[in-house]
Amino acid sequence: MIGYILCNTYALRTFMFKKIEIWILYLVLILGIPVTIGFGSVVRHEILGGTKLGRISKTALFFAEIPENIKKIFFNKNANEVLDRSPLLDSFNGTPNASESYLLLSRYNGDLKEGIVELVDLTNFKVLHTWNPDINAFNELISKIDEFKYMDRDQNNSRQLLINPKLIRDGGLIINTKMLRKINACSNLIFQKNNDILHHSIETDIEGNIWVPSTIYPQILKVKVGNELNADGGYADDGIVKLSPDGEILFEKSVSQIFIENGLEYLLFSVGDSNFTLDPIHLNDIQPVNYNGEFWQKGDVFLSLRHQSMVILYRPLTNEIIWKGTGPFFHQHDVDILNGHKISIFNNNSKDFSVGDVVDGHNEVIIYDFNTNEYSSYLSDSLKNNEVRTITDGRSQILPNGDLFVEETNYGRTFYFNSDGSLRWMHVNRAKNGNVYNIGWSRILYKDEDVKSVNNFLKSKGKCND
């Protein structure tokens, strides 16, 4: 009996590992290459919004996403979970601020499984108010005809972050959810703008007008970029938008047009592969100038162009690029005006290596001095020692006393450094289940006018969800 088993086992192994004819292997490889390319083309057609292939491309995308969905089920059960960089910490840790200041903390609440904004008193870390709007209900008010332009899998209560919240003078809160929305103290909708995709930063000028990046669709320049896999032959035509406090569009301009009309067309489509040329600009921050100075005028705007690793000073009044800076920063975000001759830039320091987009070392806060035409790094050792290295997103703010506020967006951490570089406090967006979740471009409020707006809001907000 034992001999019979051994004999059959040997026969089975011989059958299983029998040498395959080499021509069969070559045939499989030859046939597999065009099949793989074709499958990839069909998937990309669906991702880019193509409709010609109908359910064929949808089915292909379903199969292509199976590995990622399995990964999410077993390893990352929520798309807003992030890598835990501070496993022993949660919430606020450290010493509160001595002077009156507040934080508009935009975060994904892992307990509620929704994006919220909290108004935090930084002198004691107490939450004074919470906004938790019903994004699903807001979506129902949008025309089904336009839905394809604005809706994706992130546009719902369970996945949507409320990006870069801005508390404005009338007590309303402006949030970015790939469209601009204004809500009141009770998180009820005041208005939402869905004429184009509005994204990234929200800033207001001295007159209370709102500045926000947009992606203009259909793009203003009727050019073909990328390759035949690009469904409509277009690209991400980023623009700058100025709105009144009531949401009326006062000004809109394509950054591509700005480049072309200022002799910089060569920057748009001259280099990079098809992915780069589909998004050659990637405007992520608009910083309005509120006063006249030696190097700028009231009404100018600083623009951060991530995919150009460039910051420009643009004058809408005359359609001129007054200054453009490319320096020791890569894929940067968040430009701030420090004084009459200095600006700060949050340098992601991320570069496209063979393994993908990674931070080369750590994030930095770069200061540019228009007087000396020199760049310098601010409290670099503090960011290095705390391993601050968000690949995308990220924000910083140098306060008048030299303290530094930093958001490490990708890893759910917020930092406040004293002017001497020591860490004063850190916040980790951890839920009760122990996981850390995304944060969404929070904003520190410390200026006199901001503190006044907060106090007025707290006095007049009434009772809602506190």
Image: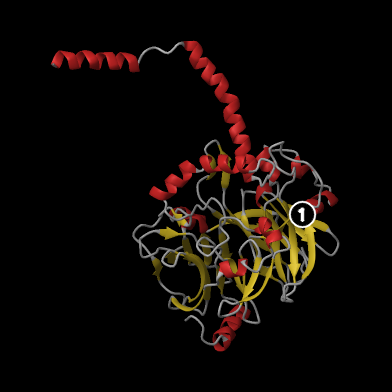
Residue 35: image quadrant is: top right
Depicted 24 relative to depicted 418: above or below:
above
Q: Position of residue 341 (x, y in %)?
A: 70, 64
With 341 as the anchor, is 329 left or right in this view?
left
Depicted 123 relative to depicted 41: above or below:
below
- Residue beneath the point at 61% across and 63% down: 177
Residue at mark 1: 255
- Residue beneath the point at 85% across and 51% down: 261
In the foreground, 49 or 269 = 49
Query: Hey, which residue is sitting farthest left in the picture?
Result: 1
Q: Quadrant of the N terminus?
A: top left
Residue 271: image quadrant is: top right
Mark 1: few, some, or many residues within 10 Å (few <14, many ≥20)? many
> Tag 1's secondary structure?
helix
Residue 420 visible in the shown view: no
Depicted 251 relative to depicted 16: above or below:
below
Q: Position of residue 7 (x, y in %)?
A: 21, 13
Residue 109 visible in the shown view: yes
In the foreground, 346 or 43 = 43
How is the model colour-coded? secondary structure
Q: Position of residue 129 (x, y in %)?
A: 50, 79
With 345 as the anchor, is 105 left or right in this view?
left
In the foreground, 323 or 348 = 348
Q: Position of residue 244 (x, y in %)?
A: 75, 74
Looking at the picture, which amino acid does disc 1 mark?
Val
In the foreground, 80 or 53 = 53
